[in-house]
Image (cartoon, helix red, strand yellow):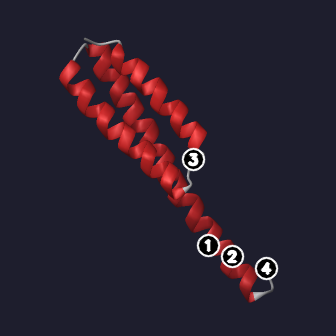
Amino acid sequence: MANIHSQEKRIHRSERERLENRQYTSSVRTYFRRLSAAVEAGDAESADAEHRVLASRIDRAVRHGAIHRNNGARKKARAARLRARVS
């Protein structure tokens, strides 16, 4: 355990930031699964809605630093390819 006050503060801050990052990345995975399910069901309208929300979640995660911008771009490209599979 840390003996210095600033170390304790840093430990608490790191844990809080880690949990925030997990929320962002978890929501991206959740919406990716929802998009996949909509595409598998062949529901174009639902797939469009899920794709819009997923792109927004990815942008938000990148903006907050939870994922790297190149990782976010790759995820958005994969989502777009997935979305294009349903007509």
Marks 2 and 1, how far apart in space? 5 Å
The numbered disc on residue 2 is 4
Return the disc, 4 or 3, that comes first in the chain's sequence.
4
Q: Are marks 1 and 3 in contact (CB under 8 Å)?
A: no
The N terminus lies in which quarter of the figure? bottom right
Task: Determine which quarter of the picture holds residue 65.
Answer: bottom right
Quadrant of the image containing the C terminus: top left
* Label 2 with label 1: CB-CB less than 8 Å: yes
Are dots 4 and 3 in contact, CB under 8 Å?
no
Q: Which mark is residue 13?
A: 1
Question: Which disc, if any, is residue 55?
Answer: none
Real-space Cα distance between discs 4 and 2?
A: 10 Å
Foreground pick, 4 / 70: 70
Secondary structure of the residue carrying numbered label 2: helix
Residue holding disc 2: 10
- As shown in the figure, which amino acid type bears the numbered disc 4? Ala
At which x and y percent is residue 77? 47, 27
Separation of residues labelled 4 and 3 (CA atoms): 29 Å
Q: Residues within 10 Å of mark 3 (few under 14, many from 20)?
A: some
Question: Mark 1 belongs to which amino acid?
Answer: Arg
Camera-near label (4 vs 2) is 2
